[in-house]
Image (spheres, rainbow, N blue to C red):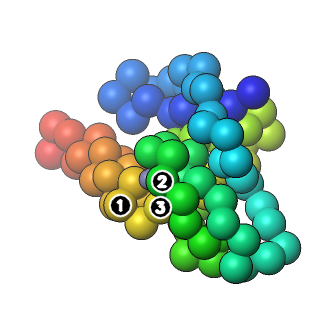
Amino acid sequence: MAEKWDFEKHRYEPYSLPPFATIYENDMEKIVVCAECGKPMKYGTSYVSLAIHNFMGFGYAVCEECHRKELAAKYKEKTKGQ
Ligand SMILES: [Zn+2]
């Protein structure tokens, strides 16, 4: 069971992970999929999601593109009203 942080609503929403989404792998060469867009990638090139977390708050692996989108969403929220 995963949850996704909504940067605008400031709360977690239930999130269905794509198959083969992962939090941690020993093998950096292993092909996993981005927890956000489902794109296959090498685990070693993935980023830790800022939004998609498991029940303990650990971030799932996401691709660079989704990582940038999360950063943008987070930054936008932080600078809101300034
Ligand atoms: Zn992605």
**Mark 1 CB near ligand 1 (8 Å cut):** yes
Q: Where in the figure is residue 76, as x and y percent of width and height?
A: 24, 46
**Mark 2 CB near ligand 1 (8 Å cut):** yes
> In which quadrant of the rendered image does the N terminus lie?
top right
What residue occupies the far right of the structure in this picture?
Answer: 26
Mark 1 to mark 2 CA distance (whole Å) = 10 Å
Labelled pair 3, 2 in contact (Cβ < 8 Å): yes
Query: Disc 2 marks which amino acid?
Result: Lys
According to the image, label 1 marks what residue?
Answer: 65
- Mark 3: which secondary structure? loop
> In which quadrant of the rendered image does the C terminus lie?
top left
**Residue at position x 68%, y 31% in the image:** 2
According to the image, label 2 marks what residue?
Answer: 39
Mark 3 to mark 2 CA distance (whole Å) = 8 Å
What residue occupies the far left of the structure in this picture?
Answer: 82
Badge 1 or badge 2: first in the primary sequence: 2
- Mark 2: which secondary structure? loop
